[in-house]
Image (cartoon, rainbow, N blue to C red):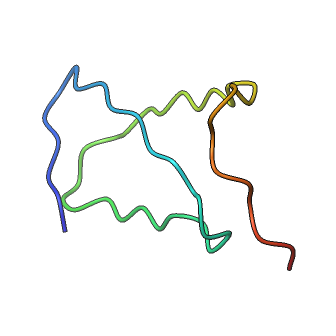
Amino acid sequence: MREFGAGAIWRMEDVAGSGHTTTVLGDEDVRLAIVQLPSQPGDPIPKET
């Protein structure tokens, strides 16, 4: 588990095809912006599901 504070920015990659799980701890509202970046040369090829 990782904890990120207000204003944190991070990049996640799903290279295994299993996705990510997000859990909000506490009573405060959370806003997320998710941006899917285009594939780049050298990126791993995702496994077919």
Q: Quadrant of residue 36?
A: top right
Q: In this figure, what is the number of numbered marks? A: 0
Q: Indicate left or right for 31 with 28 as reference.
A: right
Q: Quick one: which residue is furthest to the top in this view?
A: 7
Q: Quadrant of residue 15?
A: bottom right
Task: Identify which residue is drawn at 60% across, 70% down.
Answer: 16
In the rendering, at what x and y percent does residue 11 appear? 41, 34
Q: 45 or 25, which lies in front?
A: 45
Q: Quick one: which residue is furthest to the bottom in this view?
A: 49
Reply above or below: 33 against 14.
above
Q: Indicate left or right for 16 with 40 as reference.
A: left
Reply above or below: 15 against 36.
below
Q: Quick one: which residue is furthest to the right in this view?
A: 48
Task: Identify which residue is drawn at 74% across, 60% down.
Answer: 46
Reply above or below: 26 against 35.
below
Quadrant where the N terminus sits is: bottom left
Q: 30 or 44, which lies in front?
A: 44
In the rendering, at what x and y percent does residue 4 appear? 17, 42
Q: Quadrant of residue 10?
A: top left
Task: Identify which residue is drawn at 69% across, 27% down.
Answer: 41
Quadrant where the C terminus sits is: bottom right
Reply above or below: 17 against 33.
below
Q: 1 or 40, which lies in front?
A: 40
Task: Identify which residue is drawn at 86% across, 73% down.
Answer: 48
Q: 4 or 16, which lies in front?
A: 16
Q: Indicate left or right for 6 with 11 as reference.
A: left
